[in-house]
Image: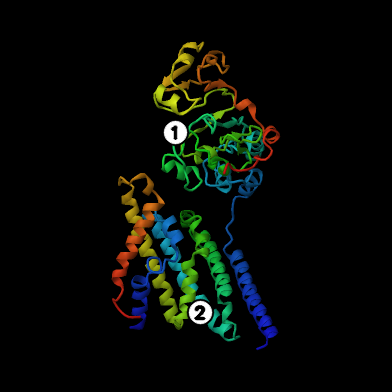
Amino acid sequence: MKLIMIFISAALINNFVLTYFLGICPFVGVSNKIENALNMGLATTFVMTLTAAVTWPIYTYILVRFNVPFLEYVAFIIAIAALVQLVEMYIRKSSPALYRALGIYLPLITTNCAVLGLALFMVLREYNFVESIIFGFATGAGFTLAIVMMSGIREELEFADIPKPFQGISVTLIIAGMMALAFMGFAGLMRG
Amino acid sequence: MTITGLIIVSAVSMGGLGAVLAVFLAFADKKFKVTEDPRIEAVLGILPNTNCGGCGYPGCRMLAEAIANGNAPANTCVAGGNDVAKKLAALMGVEAKDHKRMLAVVLCKGGGKEAGKRAQYTGDRTCTAANLTGGDKSCTYGCLGYGECVDACKFDAMAMNANSLPVVFYDKCVGCGACARACPRDIIEMHPEEHRLFVYCRNKDKGAASRKVCDVACIACGLCVKDCSVLGGIALKDNLATVNYALAPQSDESTKRCPTKCIFSGIEDQMTKSRFEAAEPQRAGRKAV
């Protein structure tokens, strides 16, 4: 039951993009086409799940054990960078087509604050290993949901008659704000 | 724990973590090694690696892949010019085709002195932002003067002069077109270097209106059209004299009578970087604002 709560909480109620405003850069930058947005979302979900699986042992068995938990930022950033590198190598080897489709977005996940935020929240909320992995996967799912919804709206916007000062990023940010308001409707769905 | 102990533990744990991940990545690199066409690296070594985007590919690496696969001709790189084209042709074993040098031409002469202002602009000091409001100049077609083209130039080939107009250094310009893409008013055009005759104005308003806002605007009087030695060499289009480069002679015999001197021959007297530095030492390599 607690795992389901963590999942729904991270994916909907406390959606990283629309509630904590983390990972706005790819949310705005890669949301112009549904296909790209979905690929980006899936890659991020994958990295987030792996991040949770790797950073939890690092935190518990290295940082806490040697009593240096203040090094979490440095340790997490190193681990995330290495992970993204690994994922990039793997995708390049296994699926050149996907590698080309993801292009620059793959290395960009390294600097995605949502991934670091995930690792930090995981520590802050004192999740255990399984909960952390569920949390990582749910956060990625929430990110994918938000970015795909955004890209769907933006594809329709291509045909809308937008006043000149609002075109491009401006209208995207306004829509992001509206989506964030809509997601506030999930607040109070459940506690936790 | 003492502070020394803490430092040692931190250094060892972080260093250890880094080392473990490094070894892990090195192993993964071996395992997931992708064998690539070695020519891609060779081509990339010859390309300028400035990632200017002038060729139309996202970066030099993409172009290198295209050239190595035979999807792009060896003279695609605009920034490299003839040298790079020849080297690439030799590497790829294809016949060297001459690279056509393109140059950027700023088609506006209405700087601070010539063009009037209609308002004070206090917004973000970029051309794109100023263009959204219509700009502070009375002429809504002319150069805004905030130097976005100069910022876009990766080859140190542009600067803003004291009159708030961009100047292109023709010894440095490689013709990548970054400035032309950066300009929100499309004032900068890319031309082959043989082109000499230009109408340095973009104002499409009727003569009386354009004369009012700028001293050097094209007022569409049609004198150059009449005087041109080749029929159809210069035509009036949208209240603007337009040169037909296939026909018109590139000397300025036909443009002597232009009342506002907005059409003439010569690309800014072939301005070079050293000349600009001699004329305006304090402005070289700097933005307008």
Q: Amino acid at mark 1?
A: Ser
Front in this rendered view, residue B173 or B225? B225
- Mark 2 burial class by Cα count in 10 Å: few <14, some 14-19, many 20+: many
Q: Is residue A137 visible?
A: yes
Q: Is residue B266 left or right of residue A26?
A: right
Image quadrant where residue B268 sits: top right
Between B157 and A31, the one lying in front of the other is B157
Q: On what subunit does the disc labeled 2 rest?
A: A
The secondary structure type at the circle numbered 1 is loop
- Left or right, residue A23 beside residue B68: left
Q: Nearer the viewer, mark 2 or mark 1?
A: 1
Compared across the picture, whether A61 is left or right of A170 comes to right
x 57%, y 16%: residue: B252
> Whole-percent x and y of residue B167?
60, 34
* Percent position of residue A50, x then y: 48, 72
Dots 2 and 1: beta carbons under 8 Å?
no
Residue B282 location (% of width, % of height): 67, 40
Quadrant placement of the C terminus of chain A: bottom left
Whether A138 is drawn above or below A111: the answer is below
- Residue wearing tag 1: B138
Indicate the quadrant containing the N terminus of chain A: top left, top right, bottom left or bottom right: bottom left
Q: Residue at x 41, y 72 (%)?
A: A137
| C-alpha gap between disc 2 and disc 1 | 62 Å
